[in-house]
Image (cartoon, rainbow, N blue to C red):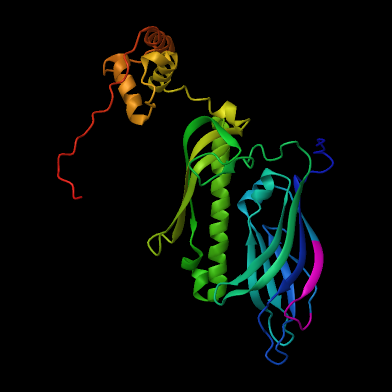
Amino acid sequence: RVRCDELLPMPAVIKIRVCSARNLPVMDRTTELTDAYITLQFADAPQLRTHVARRTLNPLWNREFRIEVADDNELQDHPLQIRCWDKDIMSSDDEIGAVTVDLNPLLLQPTQLSGWYPLYDTLRGFCGELSLVIKMDFIGDVNPFKESGAGVQFFSLAAPPAGMRLASVQGLVEELISAPDPEHHWVDSFRTARLSNERRQLLLAELSGKLRRQMGSKVLEAGGNAVLSFCITLDLEGEQSGAIVARGLGTSVKLRPAASAATLEPPLSPDPYLSSAAAAAAAVPPSAASPSSTISRQSSCTWRQHLWGGVPPPITAPANVAALAAAATAAALPPLPPPALRVDSRPHLS
C-alpha cells in the first residue's frame, strides 16, 4: 500500500451490503405482514438506513453503505449494530430484532464476513434472519493498527493452531477494566426493559473489544504476535458498586508458519536395545542358531539376555551403542535352548 496520510486521513472504510431478510414475524395484525427496514450504527458515526419494504415477511433491499473510520481504536472497541424495524404510521416504529457484529476478524486479513445472521430480540428471542456482506478497506499506512495491537491474534486453545508453530513464549498477559452497569443507572428506572437489555449487551461487546486492544498492545511491546489460552471473565457487581468488571487472561507468544513436518519434529532415534539385538541376530551364522526356531517377542527378550547377561548396558552416547553392537556381532552366540517338552501322564480314554 502507498502511504497517503495527507490525502486520505481515514485509516479504514467499512463496506456493508444489506441484502435481504427472511422469516420475519408478523407485526401488523390487520394485514398479517410487516413493513421492515434496516438501520446501521457504528460508534458515533451518523445512522444509516434502508428503504421500507412494504407488506412482506421476506423483504429484499440490496443496499450498500460506507462508513469511514477516523480512529483505528474504534474498530476494536465498538461493534457494528444492525437493527430491523417495522414501520408504523400512527405510532412509533417497533423493533423486530438486532444483530451485533464484531469487526476484529476483518483487521487481521483482507477478507469479508457474509451469510445469514440471526435477528435477536432480548424479550422475544429469535425473530428471523438477515443476509449481510461486510468487508473493510484499509487506507494510508502499511500497518495502520500498529499502535492499537489489532494484528495480535487471540486463541482460546492452549496449543498453536494448525499450520503454526511456537517460536517463543513471553509469559502471562492480563488486563482489568470496569464500566458502570446500565441496569443500575438512574435512567433505568423509567426506560423500557428492551432498551436496558440492549444497552447491557452493547456494553459487554465493547468491554470485550477494549480488553483485546489493550492486551494486544502489551503483547506487541513484549515481542509477541498472539495470545494462547485466552479467556474473558465478567463480574456483575450488582447494587454494591453498580459496575461490570471484565478481566482478560492469556499467554503471550510468538507464532510462525509451520514449514514442514520434518522441520518441526526430528526423526526419533531407534531403540538401542532392539537395534543392537537385531544386528547381532542378523550376523549369527545359520549353523549357530536353531534352524526351526523363529525370533518372536519372547525369544527377542532371550537374545537380549544372551547379549548382555540379563542387564542392559547404560546408554550414554550412540558411540557406546555401536561398540556394544559390534562386540555382540563378533562374539559366537550359543543357540537358544530348545523348549522343554511337557509329558502328560494322565490316563486317556480310548
Q: Residue furthest bottom?
A: 30
Q: Quadrant of residue 292?
A: top left
Q: Residue at x 57, y 68 (%)?
A: 198
Q: Residue at x 57, y 55 (%)?
A: 206
- Magenta run includes residue 185: no
Q: Nearer the viewer, residue 286 or 24?
A: 286
Viewer can see residue 312: no
Residue 346 appears left or right of 21 = left
Q: Quadrant of residue 41?
A: bottom right
Residue 128: x and y in percent read 65, 74
Viewer can see residue 237: yes
Residue 47: x and y in percent read 73, 64
Q: Nearer the viewer, residue 147 or 270?
A: 270
- Magenta run includes residue 56: yes
Seen in the picture, residue 242 relative to 259 is either above or below; the reply is below
Seen in the picture, residue 9 relative to 57 is either above or below; the reply is above
Seen in the picture, residue 335 relative to 119 is either above or below; the reply is above
Residue 108 appears left or right of 50 = left
Q: Quadrant of residue 67?
A: bottom right
Q: Which residues are magenta?
A: 54-64
Seen in the picture, residue 287 relative to 176 is either above or below; the reply is above
Q: Residue furthest front?
A: 350
Residue 141 appears left or right of 209 = right
Residue 289 appears left or right of 157 = left
Q: Residue at x 51, y 47 (%)?
A: 156
Q: Residue at x 51, y 36 (%)?
A: 252
Image quadrant holding the N terminus, namely top right
Residue 259: x and y in percent read 63, 30
Q: Residue furthest right?
A: 7
